[in-house]
Image (cartoon, rainbow, N blue to C red):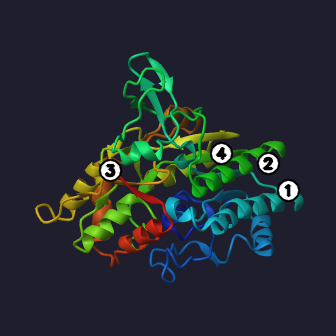
Amino acid sequence: MTHVLVTGGAGFIGSHLVDELVSFGYDVTVVDNLTEQVHVGKPDYLNDEVEYIWGDIRDRELMTELLEDADVLNHQASAVGVGQSMYEIEKYVEVNTLATARILDIIVNEEIDLEKVIVASSMSSYGEGAYRCSEEDEIRYPPLRDAEQMKAGEWEHVCSECGAELEPIPTPESKPRESTSVYAISKRDQEELTLSVCRAYDIPAVALRYFNIYGSRQSLDNPYTGVCAIFSSRIKNNNPPLIFEDGQQTRDFIHVSDVARANRLAMESDASDVALNIGTGDPKTIHSIAQTLIELYGKDGELEPEIANDFRQGDIRHCFPDTALAAEEIGFEAEVGFKQGMRELVEWGRTQDAEDRFEEAQTELEEKGLVGED
C-alpha cells in the first residue's frame, strides 16, 4: 500500500485531500501544527483511518523521520493570506519558502527515496491574468494598475499600444509570472524549489496552481482567507459583504472536492516536472459571488453587497485559467458546478459559528497603507 505524507492535512484543502486518498485505499500520515489563526483545537472532521502528527514542518528532525517512512509527499502546508503577507513578511517566507527548502534539503541529503512529490502552488504568482487587445488582435500581459489609475476609479486595463480596453482571456501556464505579494512570491518559491530540486534528482514532481478554492471546512473566522468564507462570515452576522473596486473583477472559483481529486490524479499520473492550473475556466464576478451567498443564506431583501469603491494595493483585475494542460497531463476537469458547490458551502456554513473579523483585518490593512480610496 502506498504511504502518502500530507503536510497541512488537517486544514481546509488538506483534510479533503486526506479523505480522497483514504477512500482510494492509500495509507496516509498527516503532519499539521493546527495554527491558531485557522484552528481552535483539533477539528471534528479528522479521518479516523489516518495517523496525525501534531508538529511543525519547520522541525527538521520530525520531518526527516516522517519522510523516511513515506512513498509520496503531498505538500499542502503554507501560511495563507495575500494582504497579511505584506506586513508579516518574515513569517510567510519562513513558513512557505524556508520550510519547503528544508524539506527538500532533507530529501536530498538524507537520500529519501520518494516515488513522487506534489506541491500546492497558486494562481497568485501570475499577478494579472492574460488579456487580448481586440483592436490589434494581440495577447497582452499588463502590469499592475498604478495608484493614480485606481484612485480615479478606472478599474479596467487598457492596451498600452492603442488605448483600447483589454478583454480578459484564459490564462495559460506559459504566461510570464509577476508575483504581486509576499504570499505570491513564497508560493512561487515553493513551486520552483520543488520542481527544480526534484528535476535534478530525478524525482517525479507536479505543482498544482490552485485558483480560488471554496467549500466546507474553510475557516469562517479567518479574515485573511478566501472571499467566499469572508463573505459567509459577514452574512451570517447580518453584515453586508464589502466589495473592493466596483465588484466586476473576476476570479475562478473551484470546489475543494475537485481540488482533492486533482491532487490524487496528479499523484497517480505519469506527469512530472510540470505546473498545472487547477480551476474551472468559468470566471465569476466578485459581486455575483456575494449576491449568490446572500440568496443561499436566505438574506435576500435584507442584505445587499456594499461596493466600497476603494482598492487594495497589489490587487489584480481579472485572472481565470486555461485548463487544457491539466486535462492533457492528468485527466483533470472540474466536476462540481458553481451553484452545487455554493449550496454545499452554505449548508455546512449554517452549522458553524462564525466571528466576523473583517473590519479588524481591514483596519490592519489601512494602518499599513495597503488600502486606497478612489
Q: Position of residue 339 (x, y in %)?
A: 27, 50
The residue that appears at 60% across and 32% down in the rendered structure is 174
Amino acid type of disc 4?
A: Val
Amino acid type of disc 3?
A: Ile
Label 2 environment density (alpha carbons within 10 Å; few <14, some 14–19, many ≥20): some
Q: Are marks 2 and 1 in contact (CB under 8 Å)?
A: yes
Which mark is first along the chain, 3 or 1? 1
Which mark is first along the chain, 2 or 4? 2
Amino acid type of disc 2?
A: Val
Q: Which residue is mark 3?
A: 286
Q: Nearer the viewer, mark 2 or mark 3?
A: 3
Q: Which residue is mark 1?
A: 108
Q: Which residue is mark 4?
A: 206
- Specify the quadrant that holds the N terminus: bottom right
Q: Which residue is mark 2?
A: 197
The residue that appears at 67% across and 77% down in the rendered structure is 55
Query: Foreground: 240 or 110?
Result: 240
Which mark is first along the chain, 4 or 3? 4
Q: Nearer the viewer, mark 1 or mark 3?
A: 3
Query: Foreground: 134 or 233?
Result: 134
Q: Distance between the Cα atoms at labels 3 and 4?
A: 30 Å
Question: Which secondary structure lies at badge 2?
Answer: helix
Which mark is first along the chain, 1 or 2? 1
Label 3 environment density (alpha carbons within 10 Å; few <14, some 14–19, many ≥20): many
Q: Based on the displayed image, in which of its 4 quarters is residue 165 positioned?
A: top left
Which mark is first along the chain, 3 or 2? 2
Q: Position of residue 306 (x, y in %)?
A: 24, 59
Q: Distance between the Cα atoms at labels 1 and 3?
A: 43 Å
The residue that appears at 76% across and 66% down in the rendered structure is 69
Q: Distance between the Cα atoms at labels 1 and 4?
A: 17 Å
